Amino acid sequence: MDTAKKWETAARRYELHAQKQKLEPKIVLPVEASLSFQQWLDSEEGKAARLLLHNANREIVVGYTDPVNGQTAAAVFAATSRIRHVGVVGLAAAYTKEEPERTYLTNEEFVRLSFSVNDDLNTEADLIQFLRTELNQIADESP
């Protein structure tokens, strides 16, 4: 079974599970991106990836920055968007009422942020492979 089919099958299982809980999927396609990452997002595999994340109600954290003044930033791949998540971490989190900040990124900004928060990622191909690995785990966990 190819990867896109595996993810589509898992996405259908999550969708059926969600329908039992009366959740409605809403897919928004991304715009503006780095060429090869954009090509992946537009492919059958990329569409199946977003559908799987949506129906599983999951996001993929690509990596975090080192904490500075008790805060860290994360690159997050979600079904409908690419996000920079900034929040308080560590002991400071226990003493603050500050809410995390989520900023929506263009795909190009997301790729650059991903490279800065995950030292194992040097190319867009590395990023795509990282996402594939995470998506396969989510697919394998489907009900």
Image (cartoon, rainbow, N blue to C red):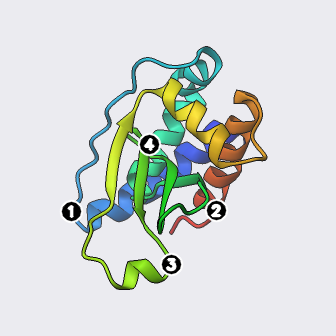
The type of residue carrying mark 4 is Leu
Query: Which residue in the protein does label 1 denote?
Result: 22
What's the distance in space between the residues labelled 4 and 3, CA to CA?
33 Å
Cβ–Cβ under 8 Å for marks 2 and 1: no
Residue 136 visible in rendering: yes
Quadrant occupied by the N terminus: top right
Residue that sits furthest to the top in the current view: 35
Q: Earlier in the sequence, mark 2 or mark 1?
A: 1
Give the residue drawn at x 42%, y 27%. Answer: 106
Query: Which residue in the protein does label 2 denote?
Result: 140
Give the residue drawn at x 60%, y 24%. Answer: 37
Residue 2 visible in rendering: no
Corner quadrant of residue 39: top right
Q: Nearer the viewer, mark 3 or mark 2?
A: 3
In the image, residue 127 lies at what x, y percent? 68, 38
Q: Nearer the viewer, mark 1 or mark 4?
A: 4
Cβ–Cβ under 8 Å for marks 4 and 3: no
Q: Residues within 10 Å of mark 1 (few under 14, many from 20)?
A: few
